[in-house]
Amino acid sequence: MTAPTPTQSPAQAGTVPVAIIGAGVAGSVLALLLARQGIRSLLVERQTEADTHPRGHVWSIRSMEVLRSIDPELAEEMRETSPAPLKLRYITWCTSLAGVDLGRCVPIGNDPAYTAHLLASSPCRPLHLSQNVADPILRRRVLAEPCVRLITGCELQALQQARDGCTLTLRARNGQSFTQQADYTVGADGEHSTVRQLLELATKVTPLQSVAQIHFRANLSKFTSPRPGPLYWVLNPAVVGTLTAHTADDSDWVLTTATLPAVEPAEAMPASRAIALVHAAIGDTRVPVDLVAVRPWTMALRRTETTRHGRVMLIGDAAAGFSAIGGFGLNHGIQDAASLAWRLGLLVNGQLHPDIAETLLASFAVERAESATFHALRTQQLTELSDEVLRAAGLDPSGFGKLTALSHSSLLGLLPRTFVRKLFAGLMAGGLKPLARLAGKDAAGMSARQRVSRAIDKQREVFVTLGTDLGYAVESGFVLREPRPQPAAPHSATEYWPTTSPGSLIPHLWSDEHGVSLSTRDLVRAAPLTLLVGQTEHARWQPALAQLRRDWGIEVACPAIGMGAEAPFQAEPADWAAALEVDEDGVVLVRGDGVVVWRSRRRCTDPGIALRDVFTGLLAPNKRSARALTSNPFQEVQ
């Protein structure tokens, strides 16, 4: 993990198949997914020390399945490190932790039917674990992986592309520069991506809110134990924000509250002010508070104009960004990595025609742009739903945006800073004044709490995202959509209807083999492309797959499914056929990220012709997205 010297230069190793700039979650996950396919990568990280500030903490089911595909023990280690489910039982709205409860949301809760459906939908469950705790776990995995070479304290200076590869110029902390050849380069280097800047790619941004994240330590168990949970919304005249327990450590907390950077930047906030805000959120000034750090964060919807430029791809925050609501940011980056890893597996390990390679990379950009737009729109929808609580409490959700715009007025630059701070403090105090009613014992207080309670009753959709997670379907790119895709669930954001309609995530079914923990999703994530057929049809498809390999250079795994001793996935024919929505002699083609590419519900008369037609269709020019988007959530920033 030391910075490279001339004698340690990675250039001595010749051309590396994949160079990954940025060793955060997205970059590390990609390196590990590639290593699982036997693909070497160089992982370059500018920082030498891990970031200890709490960050993204929602790990979706789909993301946990990706970690499980790397190694089930990795997913298990993450699960064991995360808080117990009972500690995540409630999302609470209150005037303060010690004050009046305004309402609660039970994301999983006491609904046995929903819990059973959740457990039947995947081999994994979602986790609540801060990135600063997860990062060291991933880092240990990276360091133990022979196919990954990690270099820290090193940054990218220049990037050139040729038809057959990339040349990277890297600079170590000691000022020495060296070059590295790579077949492909991936920018996973965050919001301020150097890779993106070197490619001169524009970014479309919709600003949302600037906040201060106040990281502190305090024993709050006497306030939280009656309604344990990861998140507490606080509404009072002194502070509006969220208290988040990012880890299993009961004393580790973050208060997130809106700020006006032009008036009082979060990084310049005095410790006394930060502690005062924390005490206002707790509702008890006697509680000892150990302030760790105050960090600014500008929440915005961001998307780079393209996630692919020649042999260079962008993933994670380098490609797209979201706000905290919905928890999409961290998970979108992991899905970027999963979507790219199987493609690179075919490109690096295969002998593909250039047209096929171009289709694979072009379809990556199409799919991830579509996904970024979908999740940005969903972020806006959830924000609007969440704002209903503020409206019910008597606040104008757009009020802080108006203050932010006013704070950038050139006229304010002519006034003394002290006067400006007092002016805006007074404006904010006036705007938050209606929140005082929420703690009142009179009729007005009771009426205000009832309005807020009714708004809170609608908030479950903000935190129950099973449909958005597992039910998201690829509509353009490397899939053959059917003329009439499977209908969506009535409440598609919260409800998940398993289907093998192309573009969807393959349904989860456990293998019947005793003592073996193997899901259909584990099975298909083991190779870039997998053809699922019943044991009785398995031999009939082998000549067609061999012909595909000769004609197209594409290797497709084909594990048999059945109850025979030689079948790697044990399942009764009727059970797996019902789960995959095909006849017992039907077939399903699935990508390494679990997405269904194509299916034949009935027996194919000629497997060779069927596969030829499938791949001819996949390699045709990409069609425009069929997803109906009512608006574009992004604005272009020059």
Image (spheres, grey):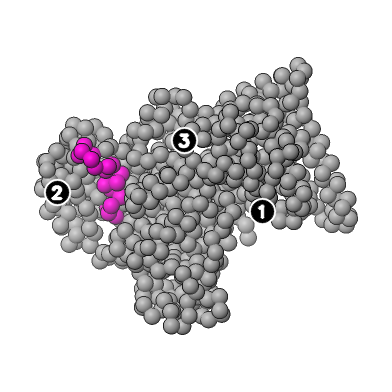
Q: Earlier along the polypeptide chain: callout 2 or callout 3? A: 3
On screen, 122 above or below 524?
Answer: above
Q: Which secondary structure, mark 3? A: helix
Q: Is residue 527 magenta?
A: yes
Q: Secondary structure at mark 1?
A: strand
Give me the C-alpha separation between circle 2 and circle 3. 45 Å
| Dominant SS type (magenta) | loop
* Residue 293 numbered tag: 1
Residue visible at 34% across and 52% down in the picture: 71
Indicate the amino acid at tag 1.
Ala
- Pick whichever, 171 or 472, lies toward us: 171
> What amino acid is at disc 3?
Pro
Name the residue nearer the viewer: 357 or 195.
195
Location of residue 413 (image quadrant): bottom right
- Give the foreground label among 1 and 2: 1
**164 sits left or right of 277 in the view:** left
Sequence-wise first label, 1 or 2: 1
Are the two marked residues, 2 and 3, in contact with CB atoms closer than 8 angstroms?
Answer: no
**Which image quarter holds the C terminus?**
bottom right
Q: Which residue is mark 3?
A: 85
381 vs 470, left or right, is right
C-alpha gap between disc 3 and disc 1: 28 Å
Residue 273 visible within the image: yes
